């Protein structure tokens, strides 16, 4: 079964307040078995315009990734993030097929 992923690009306007969002989202992520694959490490834009922070979160499947976003726990966290950060977020189903090579 293919995994599910959140891919987010974020600009944080208030780093101190963003820590409260991170603490709150940990509740939803823990409940849904989320695993951070990328969490704001070094990056270099090669094409297009990107935000300053990049996050990739893995879930056991696409349905779980969607359920986490729709959960009451994440909605509470999202209310904290809204006023202090701008983001683009996509939830995608992973690829479980043949690879090049």
Image (spheres, helix red, strand yellow):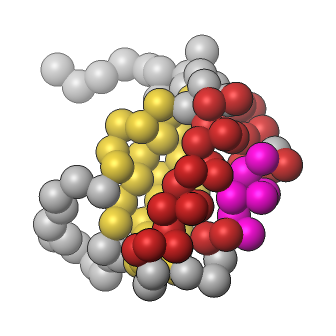
Q: Position of residue 80 (x, y in %)?
A: 67, 69
The image position of residue 18, as x and y in percent, is 50, 68
Quarter of the image where one finds residue 41 = bottom left
Q: Main secondary structure of the magenta part?
A: helix
- Residue 64 drawn at (x, y percent): 71, 31
User: Which residue sits at x=42%, y=37%?
Assistant: 36
Please indicate whether residue 82 sits to the left or right of residue 51 in the image: right
Instruction: Magenta stretch: give its range.
Output: 73-79
Above/below status of 64 relative to 57:
above
At x 53% / y 55%, what residue is drawn?
22
Quarter holding residue 33: top right
- Quarter of the figure with the N terminus: top right
Q: How many marks?
A: 0
**Residue at figure coordinates x 40%, y 53% from the top left:** 55
Foreground: 74 or 100?
A: 74
Who is closer to the viewer here, 7 or 52?
Answer: 52
Horizontal side, residue 41 vs residue 72: left or right: left
Q: Residue at x 73, y 69 (%)?
A: 79
Residue situated in front as seen by the camera: 42 or 84:
84
The quarter of the displayed image where residue 29 is located:
top right
* Quadrant where the C terminus is found in the figure: top left
Which is nearer the eye, 100 or 5? 5
Report if residue 74 lies within the magenta region.
yes
Q: Is residue 63 at all visible to an observer of this figure?
A: yes
Q: Is residue 91 left or right of residue 87?
A: right
């Amino acid at each position: 079964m293919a995994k599910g992923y959140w891919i987010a690009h974020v600009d944080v306007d208030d780093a101190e307040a963003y820590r409260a969002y991170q603490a709150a989202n940990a509740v939803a992520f823990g409940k849904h078995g989320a695993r951070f694959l990328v969490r704001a490490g070094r990056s270099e834009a090669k094409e297009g315009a990107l935000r300053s922070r990049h996050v990739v979160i893995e879930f056991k499947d696409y349905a779980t990734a969607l359920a986490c976003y729709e959960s009451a726990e994440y909605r509470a966290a999202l209310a904290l993030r809204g006023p202090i950060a701008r983001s683009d977020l996509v939830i995608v189903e992973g690829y479980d097929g043949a690879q090049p090579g």
